[in-house]
Amino acid sequence: MANLCYKPVLVVFFLFLSSLSVISTDQSSSQNSTDKPFQNHGETNSTKSSSSSSSSSLSKIISSTQSSSSKNTTSFKSKPVQNLGKNNSTSPSSSSSKNYLSFTLSLNKRSHASSATTKSSSTTLLPSLAASSSTGKQKVIKKNPFPYKSSFKYTMALVVSLPIGTPPQTQEMVLDTGSQLSWIKCNKKFPPPPKPKPKPNPSAAFDPSLSSSFSLLPCNHPLCKPRIPDFSLPTDCDQNLHCHYSYFYADGTLAEGNLVREKISLSSSQSTPPLILGCTRETRDSQGILGMNLGRLSFASQTKVTKFSYCVPPHHVPAKGPPSTGMFYLGDNPNSRGFQYVSLLTFGHAQSQRMPNLDAAAYTVGMVDVKIGGRKLNIPSSVFRPSPNGAGQTIIDSGSEYSYLVDEAYDTIKDEVLRLVGPGKWKKGYVYEGTLDLCFTDDVMKIGRSIGDMVFVFDKGVEIVVSSDRVLSDVGNGIGCLGIGRSAMLGIPSNIVGNFHQQNLWVEFDVVNRRVGFGKADCRTSV
């Protein structure tokens, strides 16, 4: 009997304690609900409790998975990227956004598959440049570090010098708004040793073995697929199971090597996250390429630069002095108040798929005519715009020295120049560098004055004025050639405005607002 009476008392006592606990829990839940009114709507307390514990467990599982996957270079085999469309500027559909995100993550940190010093990381491609803290010497920059300003050398190209790797090795790269993949010239050595060696000679090719932040992309990386549209030739696997690429340019230049990840330093305290670059071992060029077009692998796209600009100084013939110096900005340009802007032409994914000759990643603008000596040539504007198959687009290209036009526009200009100069001074049959065939054998400045100013006219009345003293290019030996060639001689069906016709101009590429701006300047003194 005593035992029978004691049990009900215990039951009552525990029920009392339980009610106190429920009251306490409800008050706590009410307080949390007041603090965070938009979280966990419609959930019971028991649901919140279980979801909280499962969320904690899930975060531990995710953390564990990330840690293990970063050490295992084959982990991405089960996560192939889907919907890699041809149009690089087209956003992925909502149905494929998860796959696209997994690809973005995979772009940023993949260690060399056979390296004994593989490092774990969950680094993602940041929305703006940020400093790496992997060495402990650089702080993470949470705010956007732009603007960045640097000078460049101008010969036949815009040559910037950028510190690349850890510790940095200064490399010369051609600023090229007409191409996508950035690449550096590498020597034959491979991945880094456990401890970096002393800083190498700045003029030498990049030495991967000296950089602790260097890593090679393995063959199972999503970019190493035969149908990736970002390369002129399919990527493939080399004998060391690294991703190999080949890149052809319109001038016949070939660059090939391995796809890698490496950081670029903008200052002693700021550097990019690891970017996809080409480590080129086979090329005839002495400099690399800083690809700045709208393609997803360009430097501009990977770092999410909102705008960039440069000022091209007057060209010096090499024999007459050292290279000229221009100015390059990433981010806002303090000189942009007086710029005139022309909008980029845009093309949907489905549309560009039907236009095989279209470069959808190029900075394509609407040109409407050309004026010479104040006279409009009345070239049909359709000549400067993409045809149904994509031929005829007009591109602003810093990586091309001269400008090139399709036949109808070129023939009209050639006829007008010969009318103004006279056929007697034309060096008929002479072709400079295989592309310029309108050359003269008299005083270059005198012939330029007889031609007068040349003007490229764009939408909204925006103009690029080429003064008479820059209409002809002095190619040496008393020969001056019109700085315009026939694009068919390059084997491309486009109109290209090259850097020769961008002298003494600020040229701004406003990526966010999809427009290109021009502003007159004396680029020898612009800051």
Image (spheres, rainbow, N blue to C red):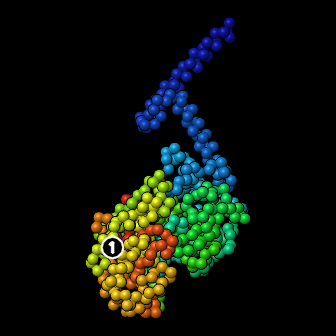
Residue at image coords 46%, 73% = 487
* Residue with the most extreme top position: 1
Foreground of the two, 353 or 196? 353
| Image mark count | 1
Tell me which amino acid carries mark 1. Answer: Val
When the figure is inspected, residue 80 is found, relative to residue 426, above or below; the finding is above
The percent position of residue 410, horizontal first and vertical second, equals 40, 75
In the rendered image, residue 186, in percent from the top left (x then y), is placed at 62, 73
Determine whether, in the image, residue 233 is placed left or right of residue 343.
right
Looking at the rendered structure, the secondary structure element under dot 1 is strand
**Direction from residue 490 to residue 467 in the image, left or right:** left
At 66% from the left and 61% from the top, the residue drawn is: 236
Residue 385 visible from this viewpoint: yes
Can residue 162 be seen in the rendering of this structure? no
Which residue is pictured at 45% across the width and 68% down the height? 494
Along the viewing direction, whichever of 280 and 387 lies nearer the viewer? 387
Local packing at callout 1 (Cα closer than 10 Å; few below 14, some 14-19, many 20+) is: many
Q: Residue at x 28, y 74 (%)?
A: 376
Front one among 501 and 243 = 501
In this view, the residue farthest toward the left is 374
Please say if 306 is above or below 184: above
Q: Quadrant of the C terminus?
A: bottom left
Q: Nearer the viewer, residue 351 or 167?
A: 351
Q: Is residue 27 above or below residue 101?
A: above
Residue 429 at what x, y percent from top left? 47, 86
The vertical placement of 92 against 444, above or below, is above
Indicate the quadrant containing the N terminus: top left, top right, bottom left or bottom right. Answer: top right
**Residue 317 x %, y %:** 44, 87
Query: Would you name the residue on which mark 1 appears?
Result: 370
